[in-house]
Amino acid sequence: MTLAFPPQTSQPQSLPPGLQPQGWLRYLSFSLDHKVIGLQYMVAGFFFYLVGGALAGVIRVELLSPISDFVPRETYNEMLTLHGTVMIFLWIVPVVNGAFGNYLIPFYVGARDMAFPRLNAVAFWMIPPAGFLLIASYFIAGAAQSGWTAYPPLSLTTPAAGQVVWILSVLLLGGSSIFGGINFIATILKLRRPGLKMMQLPMYCWAMLGTSFLVVLATPVLAGTLVLLSFDIIAHTGFFNPALGGNAVVYQHLFWFYSHPAVYIMVLPAFGLVSEILPVHARKPLFGYTTMVYSILGIVFLGLIVWAHHMFTSGTPPWMRLFFTIATAFIAVPTGIKFFNWLATLWGGKIALNSAMLFSCAFIVHFVFGGITGVALAQVPFDIHVHDTYFVVGHFHYIVYGGTVFVVFGSIYHWFPKFTGRMLNEHLGRLHFALTFIGFNLCFAPQHWLGLNGMPRRVAEYDPQFTMLNQVSSVGALLMAISTLPFLINVAWSAWAGPVAGDNPWRALTPEWLTSSPPPVENWIGPAPLVTHPYGYGVAEDQIDLKSATGQQLWSRGR
Amino acid sequence: MTSGSVAAGSVESPTSLSAEEAQEGHRDVRMFGLATFLVADGMTFAGFFAAYLTFRAVNPLPLGAIYELELVLPTINTALLVVSSFTFHRAASELRQDRPAAFRGWLLLTAALGVAFLTGQMVEYFSLPFGLTDNLYASTFYALTGFHGLHVSLGALMILIVWWQARRPGHFTPDHHFGVEAAELYWHFVDVIWLILFGILYIL
């Protein structure tokens, strides 16, 4: 492997004095450094992950028995609403977009920072107030009870104060998300280092570009809809209130116009991250770069026109059912392409089965399973049978937990050396993986069976025949809760006393590794490297004729 | 690119950069950022328009409900807003030809047209025979025009701020005047949104 590092000056670059706080204090400041902001997103997001996990714990304890005996029913509704909102808007979206996006994208485009550093800091600092507002609503006026979807008329009949605070909080988080999306689009399209072409960017850039398109196009619609909903609650207008001549289904359309793309906002960046991790630890080029790019763009386009598959039981007319079923089934094509590309990347590679790789491989397995149940759910006859049952809950968690959260953990194992300059402990990492993997599957796999047999979601009481599997599911949730302990111990201990990682412990080729760990404020000392082949692993340059190489050759040569 | 990605990881030496390319100060992408934001803002309106059109299609006005719009005042308002787009454009071109006094004059006229529009809107609100919560159509009318009016108010405020900043000679130069360009783009955006809104609320 030929790796020419940019010439390094021996003198570390002096920092602009007095501009920014130094040391750990800068993580509590209005820092403009994209790396600091990225880690702020990460830590804040993980805090909310623990909050959301505790809320899930309440739900799983309640469901240990078929009767409502652990918390009052209203509290149960508040718990499930807060769990969904916290996990989606305060953990997954900020971490998989904000944390890794802010940290990595400027490196990948060869820039010193994001396009709008101040807007970037504003976007982050909107998140903690929004989060605490949401959590505080439980203690002050009682939290919202209508689920993370806030469907009217339910959201109009549950106590108003909690619902209004919920809307306010989600509006803040949506604004933060839009600011972030604008920043990513401008950075990727306009701030690329001279000489770096779009088709040479690491895959995570493409994933973030596609995600940011979705954020910019879809999030404002949710914001407008929630403003109208708040009018319905506060001013007693009747936009979505059938009792006042309004139309509740319009709310569903507008809501899902955002919230279906939101699934891709949560999972596309994970696609990108996993496309960075697999080639490094399999020592193989990413298979099918071009098809990966076009399938991301295909998912972005299709993701915007499939929202009504969430509404097959909302009196949807037949032509709409037909269109949205077909459009949804089409999404299996680009996602299938990505799946086979990942497999082909692994095929014949020199795979290092470390924690990052284990989490990434588990992601592939879970994502395929969640994808298959997703295609099944897109079929109207099946969907009508399992709509609003635990089958949907199982499907959804296979995508966002088994998919995205697994990738988040894998990415932390992969990039922790870059963040801190120290390695994570591999034994604790594997223990973390084993507990999470077993706990996750134990928790969510039985829910498909529960749903198929008719257990509705969002209920505190259920038919006693489902007791056994609910208890299995709760044991799985307990394992998942326990699994955060080795992770937290690992991170805390390794950040302080882990073995020193060096600049490039994985011998990776993407540009964030071509600098010190942790990187200097301006990312590189001296000019930014021009990385034109970020996935050139495993094949010596002189071994292959680039002009006439085929996929077949790539596979065999890569061994 | 599939074949290209086979090449062993090559980090090309950055020495081939020209002096200009190697310059570290990054490009001014503020207008691009604003345009992206306006796409997002436009999507908010698109959501509202879609909701209104769906209401029109599936929710008939209940018997006895009052929802009538006059056309005269809104048409005058439309003309005011369209003219204000041209006056803003004129102001910016005066600035580019380095005539600061004319620039400020046209800018003030633009702001005045914006305020006149808002006044017209107020007059219309007070003379309409229905209120915010009377029926679905009334609610939608006030939400849509109100949200647009909020945009006009912000735009007029921006123009006045730009006008105030332009008092100081040299604050905006014929070559560097991001504040003016940004306010102008925003103002044109608000204008275009009004034309769509006028079309579907009043004409349709």
Image: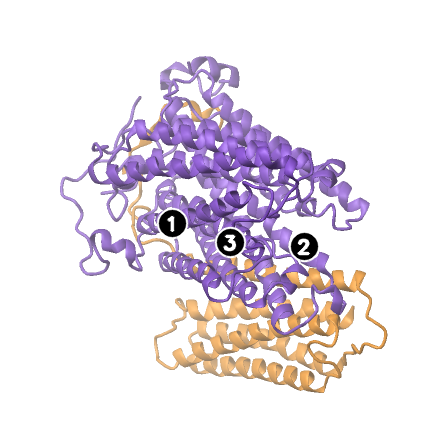
Chain colours: A purple, B orange
Residue A547 in picture, x, y percent from top left: 47, 20
Between the residue at mark 3 and the residue at mark 2, the CA separation in whole angstroms equals 20 Å
Q: For label 2, count other residues whose C-alpha is less than 10 Å away and answer few (under 14), some (14-19) or many (20+).
A: many
N-terminal of the two: label 3 or label 2? Answer: 3
Residue B171: which quarter of the image?
Answer: bottom left
The disc placed on residue A47 is 1
Q: For label 1, count other residues whose C-alpha is less than 10 Å away and answer few (under 14), some (14-19) or many (20+).
A: some
The disc placed on residue A252 is 2
Residue A200 in picture, x, y percent from top left: 43, 35
Q: State the residue in front, A370 or A225.
A: A370
Q: In the displayed structure, would residue B200 be above or below residue A453? A: below
Between the residue at mark 1 and the residue at mark 2, the CA separation in whole angstroms equals 31 Å
Residue of label 3 = A82
Task: Name the amino acid, label 2.
Answer: Gln
Check if mark 1's residue and mark 2's residue have beta carbons within 8 Å: no
> Among all residues in the image, which is located at the extreme left?
A11
Task: Name the amino acid, label 3.
Answer: Leu
Q: In the displayed structure, would residue A494 be above or below residue A522? A: above
